[in-house]
Image (cartoon, rainbow, N blue to C red):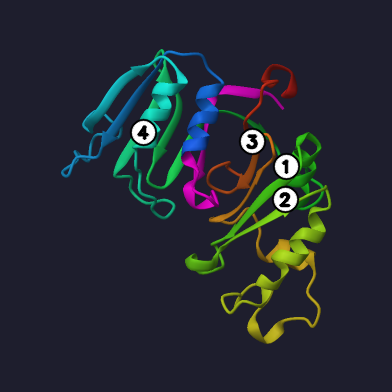
Amino acid sequence: MTFRRNDWIDVFRELLPRDDWQDLVRLQVSQYSYPVEVKFLERPLKQNPHIDDFSDWTVRSHMIMTDDSQLERFLEHLVIEQQEMATKAEVTLIIQKQGQGIVRVTNDCVSMYGVAYEELDNAGTEYENFFDAILPHATFPVEVVFCGRDVLENDDSIHVMTLHDSNWQAVLEEHVLHLLNRKEVTSGLFSKDARPARQTLEDFMSEFSLLMPYNFIVTRDATNRFGMHDHFCTNGKIAHFGKMDDRKTFFN
C-alpha cells in the first residue's frame, strides 16, 4: 500500500454525522504550509453543457490566506447548504496551494486531496477486510458510519456507532443487525416470506454488501484518521485518508 498524493477522495456530507465540513477543511489545510489560495464559486443559472470544469462559474470570493486566523474568519461566515449525495452542486469552495488543490467542498460532498488505496483481500468479506485494514492503525474511540441506501429508504439509511476496541462485530450486531427486519428488505437473501428465526452478522454483511452502489462504511478515529469503503467513491477499495502526519512511513 502506497500513499498517492495525486489522488482525491470524495466524502458525501450525509456521511458526516455532524456535517462538520469546516473541520475537514481545517484538517486538510493544517497539513500544508501557508499561503493558500481560496476560491468560492457559484454555478451559473445557464451553464454551458459542453464545459465540465469551473471556468464558467461565478467567482464570489477569491483571496490569498497567510495564516489560520484568516481562514477561521472566512469559515465562520461561510454557509454551504447541504444536499443529498450525488446531487448537482450549486456552490463550490476550493482551497489550493500553488495551483494544486487541497480540499473542495460542495453542497453534497467534501473532496480531500491525498489518499492511500488498499485492495481487498481475496479471503473474508469486505467488512472483515475493511476493519482488519483500518483498526490496527486507529486511535480509539472510532466513529463508524454505515449507509445502506442501496436497500434502505433515504430518510433512515445512515446509522452511526462507536468502537471503543477492536470488537467491531459486537457493535455491528447491536446497532445494525436489526436492519434485516426492515420492510425494504424484500428481495435477495431475505425476502419478507423467507426470513430465518435468527439472523446473523454474516447475513447482514451479505444483504448489505459494500460492493453495491450507495452502501458505504466510513470510520473516523480520535486523531481524525479516516477509512472508507464503498462502490462509488473508493471504487471497491479500502481508502485511508485524513490526518496522517506519518504519511511517508505509514503507507509503505
Please state which amino acid type lies under the numbered disc 3: Asn
The circle drawn on residue 93 is 4
User: Which residues, given as a range, are shown in magenta?
Assistant: 1-21
Tell me the residue at 76%/37% (across/down).
Answer: 139
Q: Quadrant of the N terminus?
A: top right
Res. 188 image quadrant: bottom right
Query: 10 Å neighbourhood of mark 2: few (<14), some, or many (≥20)?
Result: many
What is the secondary structure assignment of the residue under circle 1?
Answer: loop
Nearest to viewer (mark 4 / mark 2): 4
For this orientation, the residue located farthest to the bottom is 193
Q: Are marks 1 and 2 in contact (CB under 8 Å)?
A: yes
Whichever of labels 2 and 3 marks the residue nearer the N terminus, that label is 2
Q: Position of residue 199 (x, y in %)?
A: 78, 74
How far apart are labels 1 and 4 at the CA level?
33 Å
Q: Are marks 3 and 4 in contact (CB under 8 Å)?
A: no
How far apart are labels 4 and 2 at the CA level?
33 Å
Q: Quadrant of the C terminus?
A: top right
Q: Position of residue 86 (x, y in %)?
A: 42, 51
